[in-house]
Image (cartoon, rainbow, N blue to C red):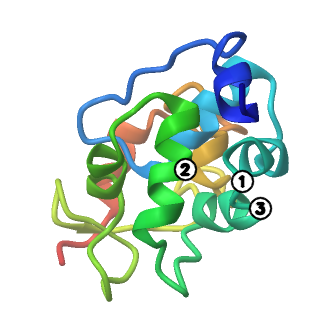
Amino acid sequence: MNNTKEAQLWLFPVEPSNGESLSHFLGRFRRSNHLSPSALGDLAGIGGVVARWERFHLNPFPTDEQFQALAEVVDVDSSTLREMLPPKGTGMKCDRHNLKLISKCPNCRAKFKMPALWEYGCCHRCRLPFAAIAQYQQSV
């Protein structure tokens, strides 16, 4: 039995949410299974790219082989994982809401953590809900 099959025996399943980014999904999966980015990359046999993907560093863009390897570990179809990526060549924007993303909370000015570390849907310092932040964002 290979490492991926053995790992699946003890990993908790995590389903992607509708419209969720790859970064946020990987963070939720790792937290549920008490894994670091490098541990998840090692299980999938893809090395340290998981940490880069969580920070939206997609250059070079993930390959089909990398997605297939990750899909086997997280038990999600590789095409579903690919759909969670921002379109190639786009900047930091929310395609679903057509808004430019901001990097700091408009209320307390704290820098946002990367999406992989979001747990509660709000600013980690002042607890302003992300839904309330949309009024501070500009349309694309």
Q: Which mark is residue 69?
A: 2
Q: Nearer the viewer, residue 92 or 60?
A: 60
Give residue 136's position: percent from left, percent from top. Answer: 34, 60
Q: Which mark is residue 96?
A: none
- Work out whether mark 2 precedes mark 1 in sequence or the reverse, and give the earlier one: 1
The quarter of the picture where residue 105 lies is bottom right
Distance from Cα at disc 2 to Cα at disc 1:
7 Å
Could you say whether the residue bearing mark 2 is in a helix, strand or loop? Answer: helix
Q: Is residue 127 visible?
A: no
- For image coordinates 47% across by 80% down, the residue present is 61
- The total of numbered circles placed on residues is 3
Distance from Cα at disc 3 to Cα at disc 1:
6 Å
The quarter of the picture where residue 131 lies is top left
| Residue located beneath label 3 in the image | 47
Q: In the rendered image of this protein, does residue 3 appear above or below residue 10?
A: below
Q: In the rendered image of this protein, does residue 14 appear above or below residue 17?
A: above
Which one is closest to the eye, mark 3 or mark 1? 1
- For image coordinates 75% across by 41% down, the residue present is 43
**Mark 2 Cα shell of 10 Å, populated few (<14), some (14-19), many (≥20):** some
Check contact, mark 2 vs mark 1: CB within 8 A. Answer: yes
Residue type (three-letter) at the residue carrying disc 1 = Gly
- Work out whether mark 3 precedes mark 2 in sequence or the reverse, and give the earlier one: 3
Check contact, mark 3 vs mark 1: CB within 8 A. Answer: yes
Residue type (three-letter) at the residue carrying disc 3 = Gly
Distance from Cα at disc 3 to Cα at disc 2:
11 Å
| Residue located beneath label 1 in the image | 45
**Mark 1 Cα shell of 10 Å, populated few (<14), some (14-19), many (≥20):** some
- For image coordinates 24% across by 32% down, the residue present is 18
Could you say whether the residue bearing mark 1 is in a helix, strand or loop? Answer: loop
